[in-house]
Image (cartoon, rainbow, N blue to C red):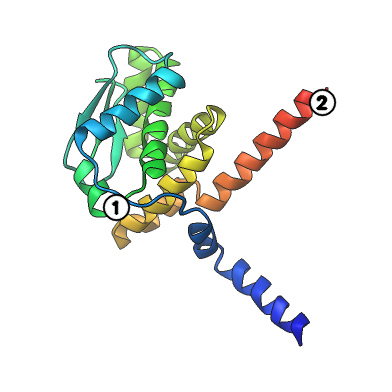
Amino acid sequence: MSYSLTTFFIFYFLATGCLFVQAAHQSQAPRQYSKADIEQIYNELRQSSFDDISEKSRLVFKKMKIFGMSSPVSLRIYINIDKINKYQWPEDAVTGLLAHELSHMVSYQRRSRLGGMFYLWNYSFSIAREKKVEREADEIAIERGYGKELVQERIYQFKGEDTRNIKKQNKIYYHPEDLEGMIDSMKSIRHMNKNE
């Protein structure tokens, strides 16, 4: 009898993996943020892990349909603090969002100004290109040590999107369980490199 109950729970958690991942990763209590709170997290990230980003890069608060975005042309990171507060994001999810957007800046800097504009234009007209751009930012954030925070960001991002956007988001962004697999793989590679 206990074997079948165990089997049931295994299948249940496999079938509802996303719910399991969400429950397992809620490490901080949600809170309301002021602009100063977000700026402090942003500045700490800039100083500790993204100090190679242009000094011209700026954080801007803007009401928009999404939680955050960045521009290769203006070098600005736009954050929708009202939407973050509406969905009560914990600090590690906010950190994940800012790490993701700062990672876009790292990516933009690898290109010329003209290359950055072409990059943005391409992004706007191709789902495949948009997917590549967003996943590249995730990979940079993970390489810089913000995988756990990125998982939280993605959980809260998917919670806060309307149903029309969720289908598109699911096609473009890595899911929390994909990110966890990448984090584990990176840990394994680092461990193997230390042992060589």
Q: Is residue 178 above or below residue 144?
A: below
- Circle number at residue 128: none
Kind of residue sitting beneath label 2: Asn
- Given residues 87 and 173, the one toward you in this image is 87
Q: Is residue 181 above or below residue 100?
A: below
Q: Is residue 180 left or right of residue 85?
A: right
Q: Name the residue at 46% across, 41% down.
A: 150
Q: Which residue is mark 1?
A: 88
Q: Is residue 127 above or below residue 7?
A: above
> Which percent across, then down, holds residue 142?
54, 33
Kind of residue sitting beneath label 1: Gln
Q: Quadrant of the N terminus?
A: bottom right
Assess whether mark 1 and mark 2 are in contact (beta carbons under 8 angstroms): no
Q: Count neighbours of disc 1 (C-alpha within 10 A) and say few if under 14, some if 14 to 19, many if 20 or more.
A: some
The numbered mark, 2 or 1, whose residue comes first in the sequence reads 1
The answer to whether one can see residue 167 in this image is: yes
Q: Is residue 189 above or below residue 49?
A: below
Q: Name the residue at 22% across, 31% down.
A: 36
Q: Name the residue at 30% across, 28% down.
A: 40
Q: Which residue is mark 2?
A: 195
